[in-house]
């Protein structure tokens, strides 16, 4: 420190900005001077810059924690930026170790099989639609149902979008319902209808990033709505290529549509103009593969009780729910009868996070593009900044790509009824010679009930997805008998619950 003491504090702070948290912790221990400079002179400045903000305008620890999405409340006792960075480092270490320790929770939303769901970490609830119809708001901490609409109010298999207290679901083939949370001091989780949006075409898909709602039709029409006004306002309507498969995702200025074999088309939300096309079939410069995991579910909770209070408490910590996989260079060596070549493969779900774009195909391929604005400039640039990862899949049982999610540099995707978790390097490009952790876990509690996920999400401290399992219902044979004399018949049925796999370590 003596040789560096002559440098201005501004220069020393710039040097420290290039150091990761473990290096800063080691630096504090090297000398009394460094300890004094970092921990006593500039602690908040140094550690705040390492934390990353939700949103970027957060300037104090309370604002940061309010916007930090956490299922377990892992950061609830944090009071300084240094404590925050320490906990974040321990969490990251668990995400990236060879055998992460996880805890699992199953949220059984009554007797209805969950179809779509969305978490609200700030208000601590889930909103979900059902295979049989209806919609429900469920407390994230107790499993209590806060609010619901019955089956005859919301169609079966309704798609759901939710963000910042606003919810959208489809009503038939050409209409969408807009609802928002009721701000009151009374009961939590109550919603009221704001509008019904009618279209003169079949609405194939929609994506909400409040206050913007993007809607797509198979018939070559696209709509961008502004929900920030008292009445939902149509901001932009424009024409796109016909044949959109329904998957779309938006960011600040652009919206991305999936067109199957024709890849992903990017349009301006402001003008509707075509910004460019990303065709995964031309991105064959960087190709690698993952061998399908040998997963044996064998969950102890393959069957749960059907009761008014669903089984909710997280299970004990375990290192056995995830299987570690390897990323190998080159294409996959699969040669099945229904194998689809890169030219014939159909691309489905896609997701954006900043400049990173990910998409998954019918044949089990995943494209990871580290810079999609650069990629849509030309095919050559797309090939330079994109990687194709091939996985084993059964195209006949895989409907246009399933679901996927990206948060920071973690990607969650489904292939062949397995859930894959992939951590990307800082530049967003998977690299075989510097392997990042890849894990897989089943999407069903038993091999006899393998059902693809109908939604999934990756967050700061957990992953979430739908999970197929069996449920036991106890039915009284003779209703006239007393409780002490009653004889019950056990009925078992298949359902889908919300599974949360938490990565928060013990501190």
Image: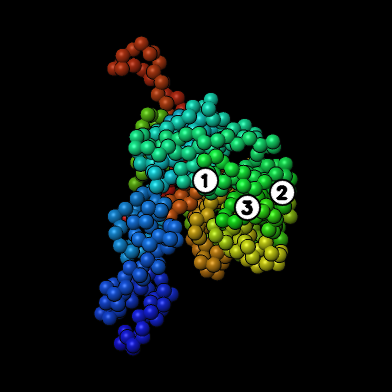
Which residue carries the number 3 mark? Answer: 269
Q: Nearer the viewer, residue 462 or 48?
A: 48
Name the one closer to the observer, 318 or 111. Answer: 111
Residue 95 drawn above or below residue 29: above
Label 3: which secondary element: loop
Q: Secondary structure at mark 1?
A: loop
Q: Nearer the viewer, residue 426 or 240?
A: 240
Label 3 crowding class (10 Å Cα cut-off): few <14, some 14-19, many 20+?
many
Relative placement, left or right, of 180 versus 329 is left
Residue 184 place in picture, x, y as percent? 37, 37
CA separation in Å, label 2 and label 3: 12 Å
Residue at the spot 33% in from the left edge and 88% down from the top edge: 6
Please provide percent x and percent y for residue 168: 54, 39
Is label 2 or label 3 in front?
Answer: 3
Residue wearing tag 2: 240
Residue 201 as seen in the image, left or right of residue 291:
right
Residue that sits furthest to the front in the current view: 230
Q: Say if residue 363 shows up in the picture.
A: no
Q: Which mark is residue 228?
A: 1
């Amino acid at each position: 420190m003596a040789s560096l003491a002559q440098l201005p504090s501004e220069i020393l702070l710039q040097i420290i900005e290039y150091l990761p948290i473990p290096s800063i912790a080691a630096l504090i221990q090297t000398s009394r001077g460094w300890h004094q400079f970092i921990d006593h002179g500039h602690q908040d400045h140094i550690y705040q810059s390492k934390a990353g903000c939700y949103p970027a305008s957060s300037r104090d620890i309370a604002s940061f924690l309010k916007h930090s999405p956490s299922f377990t409340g892992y950061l609830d006792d944090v009071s300084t930026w240094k404590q925050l960075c320490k906990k974040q480092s321990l969490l990251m270490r668990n995400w990236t170790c060879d055998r992460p320790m996880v805890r699992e929770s199953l949220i059984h939303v009554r007797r209805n099989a969950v179809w779509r769901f969305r978490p609200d970490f700030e208000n601590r609830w889930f909103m979900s639609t059902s295979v049989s119809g209806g919609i429900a708001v469920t407390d994230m901490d107790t499993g209590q149902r806060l609010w619901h609409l019955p089956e005859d109010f919301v169609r079966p298999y309704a798609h759901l979008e939710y963000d910042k207290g606003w919810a959208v679901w489809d009503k038939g083939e050409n209409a969408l319902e807009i609802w928002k949370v009721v701000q009151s001091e009374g009961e939590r989780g109550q919603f009221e209808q704001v509008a019904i949006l009618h279209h003169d075409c079949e609405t194939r898909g929609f994506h909400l990033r409040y206050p913007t709602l993007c809607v797509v039709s198979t018939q070559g029409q696209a709509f961008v709505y502004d929900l920030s006004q008292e009445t939902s306002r149509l901001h932009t309507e424009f024409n796109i290529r016909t044949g959109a498969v329904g998957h779309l995702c938006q960011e600040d200025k652009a919206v991305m549509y999936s067109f199957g074999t024709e890849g992903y088309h990017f349009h301006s939300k402001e003008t509707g103009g075509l910004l460019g096309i990303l065709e995964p079939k031309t991105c064959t410069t960087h190709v690698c593969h993952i061998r399908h995991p040998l997963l044996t579910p064998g969950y102890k909770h393959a069957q749960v009780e059907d009761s008014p209070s669903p089984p909710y408490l997280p299970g004990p910590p375990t290192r056995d729910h995830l299987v570690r996989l390897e990323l190998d260079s080159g294409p996959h060596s699969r040669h099945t009868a229904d194998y689809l070549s890169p030219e014939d493969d159909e691309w489905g779900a896609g997701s954006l996070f900043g400049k990173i774009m990910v998409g998954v195909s019918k044949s089990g391929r995943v494209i990871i593009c580290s810079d999609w604005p650069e990629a849509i400039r030309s095919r050559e640039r797309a090939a330079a900044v994109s990687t194709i990862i091939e996985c084993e899949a059964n195209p006949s049982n895989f409907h246009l790509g399933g679901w996927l999610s990206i948060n920071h540099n973690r990607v969650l995707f489904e292939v062949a009824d397995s859930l894959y978790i992939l951590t990307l390097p800082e530049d967003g490009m998977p690299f075989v010679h510097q392997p990042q952790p890849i894990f897989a876990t089943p999407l069903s509690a038993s091999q006899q009930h393998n059902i693809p996920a109908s939604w999934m999400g990756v967050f700061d401290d957990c992953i979430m997805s739908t999970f197929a399992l069996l449920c036991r219902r106890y039915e009284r044979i003779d209703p006239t008998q007393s409780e002490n004399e009653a004889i019950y018949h056990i009925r078992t049925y298949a359902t889908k619950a919300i599974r949360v796999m938490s990565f928060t370590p013990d501190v």
